[in-house]
Image: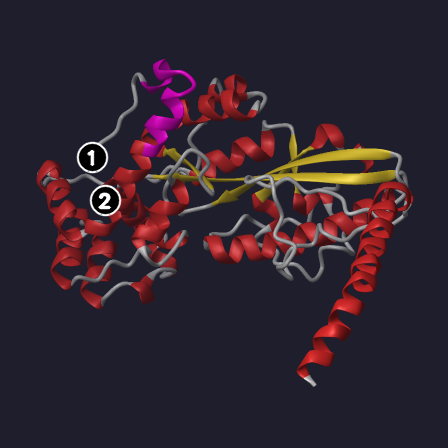
């Protein structure tokens, strides 16, 4: 029986080989001569890594079809807004001076109704490749303080809706190439806490931030006593303001990884080098009107009134390094990354940076 099976296999292997060869030949002919003329085009979307994960359900750019006549380039900047870092000033640049329009404006009113409203004003597109008649006034929402994971997830949802809209409005578009840069700005942890305290004190009558403080801390907020307040923060080990790195990841090392390297997921800017940060964006990304924005009298928006502090601030600053270990670890890494990025373009931009580490 075994001998007969061997004879049968030898008799069958040549027909099987010929069948496989023919199948391969027809597959090659189909790819070379028929598929390029098909109406089913897989169009490309360029992210930071020049690729789109089409195995992910959140990847909306992988299976779209349209008439093969035109390619549209769409470049977006999404702002990861960490509170009390100078984010309001940077947002003002994007809104009023950059020449870009937010997703809030680029989406038609009926398209944005089911999307996260706090994200849309944080993402800005280069309008040079967009039709001006598609830019609206937006829905008036404010760019929120959204964590990185949620921001990316909701950006994919929003851009999916925008892509459907653009393909409906542009029947002649064949390919839609999309790029997205994520930006954020960080601040010295001690100065950020001081700014946060002044902000809370300014709203003390409304008791907006009462629930995030301990009772003793909020009493010092009411009094406007920063030195006593921060000493209580240290002693009680209760920091009412969320750490900066947690807006990227709850793990500080993972947060550092997101802002590090030659092609980081998030491009980091530094509050203490605010002018250099804007000039860096101008050089690296070709953003317009940076000089005009820097020459305006109110470059820094949302500035809180400083309270008089009699205690030695140098001592309080040094104490903060003992109590905010992970915050300083993240901030130090951010400053080094920023210096590396700027130095690769123009080291002279770093002159005058007021960086305390």
Q: CA distance from mark 1 to mark 2?
A: 8 Å
In the displayed orientation, state which residue is furthest to the bottom.
1
CB-based contact (under 8 Å), mark 1 and mark 2 = yes
- Which residue is rendered at x = 76% and y = 65% of the image? 13
- Is label 2 in a helix, a strand or a loop? helix
Look at the image and tell me in which quarter the C terminus lies: top left
Res 353 quadrant in image: top left
Residue 65 visible somewhere in the drawing: no
- Is label 1 in a helix, a strand or a loop? loop
Residue nearer the viewer, 217 or 203:
217
Nearer-N-terminus badge (1/2): 2
Question: x, y (%) of residue 42?
Answer: 77, 47
- Horizontal side of residue 238 vs 349, given as left or right: left
- Horizontal side of residue 227 vs 208, given as left or right: left
Q: Which mark is residue 328?
A: 2
Q: Which mark is residue 357?
A: 1
- Which residue is rendered at x = 75% and y = 48% of the image? 163
Q: Which residues are magenta?
A: 337-350
- Which residue is rendered at x = 19% and y = 56% of the image? 220
Res 97 quadrant in image: top right
Res 207 quadrant in image: bottom left
Question: x, y (%) of residue 160?
Answer: 71, 53
């Amino acid at each position: 029986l075994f001998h007969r099976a061997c004879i049968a296999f030898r008799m069958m292997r040549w027909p099987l080989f010929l069948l496989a060869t023919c199948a391969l030949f027809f597959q090659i002919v189909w790819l070379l001569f028929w598929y390029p003329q098909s109406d089913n085009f897989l169009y490309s979307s360029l992210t930071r890594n020049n690729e789109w994960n089409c195995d992910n359900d959140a990847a909306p750019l992988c299976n779209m079809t349209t008439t093969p006549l035109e390619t549209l380039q769409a470049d977006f900047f999404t702002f990861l807004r960490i509170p009390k870092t100078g984010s309001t000033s940077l947002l003002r640049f994007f809104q009023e001076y950059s020449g870009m329009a937010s997703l809030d404006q680029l989406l038609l009113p009926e398209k944005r109704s089911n999307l996260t409203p706090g994200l849309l004003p944080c993402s800005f597109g280069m309008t040079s490749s967009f039709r001006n008649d598609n830019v609206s006034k937006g829905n008036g929402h404010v760019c929120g303080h959204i964590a990185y994971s949620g921001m990316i997830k909701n950006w994919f949802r929003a851009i999916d809706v925008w892509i459907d809209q653009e393909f409906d409005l542009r029947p002649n578009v064949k390919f839609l190439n999309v790029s997205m840069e994520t930006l954020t700005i960080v601040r010295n942890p001690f100065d950020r806490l001081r700014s946060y305290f002044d902000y809370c004190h300014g709203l003390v009558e409304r008791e907006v931030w009462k629930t995030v403080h301990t009772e003793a801390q909020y009493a010092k907020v009411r009094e406007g006593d920063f030195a006593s307040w921060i000493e209580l923060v240290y002693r009680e080990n209760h920091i009412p303001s969320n750490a900066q790195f947690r807006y990227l990841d709850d793990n500080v090392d993972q947060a550092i990884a997101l802002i590090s390297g030659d092609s980081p997921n998030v491009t980091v800017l530094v509050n203490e080098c605010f002018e250099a940060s804007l000039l860096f964006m101008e050089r690296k990304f070709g953003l317009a009107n940076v000089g005009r924005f820097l020459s305006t009298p109110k470059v820094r928006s949302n500035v809180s009134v400083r309270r008089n502090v009699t205690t030695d601030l140098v001592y309080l600053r040094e104490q903060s390094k003992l109590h905010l270990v992970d915050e300083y670890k993240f901030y130090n890494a951010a400053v080094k990354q920023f210096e590396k990025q700027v130095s690769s373009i123009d080291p002279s931009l770093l002159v005058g940076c007021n960086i305390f580490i």
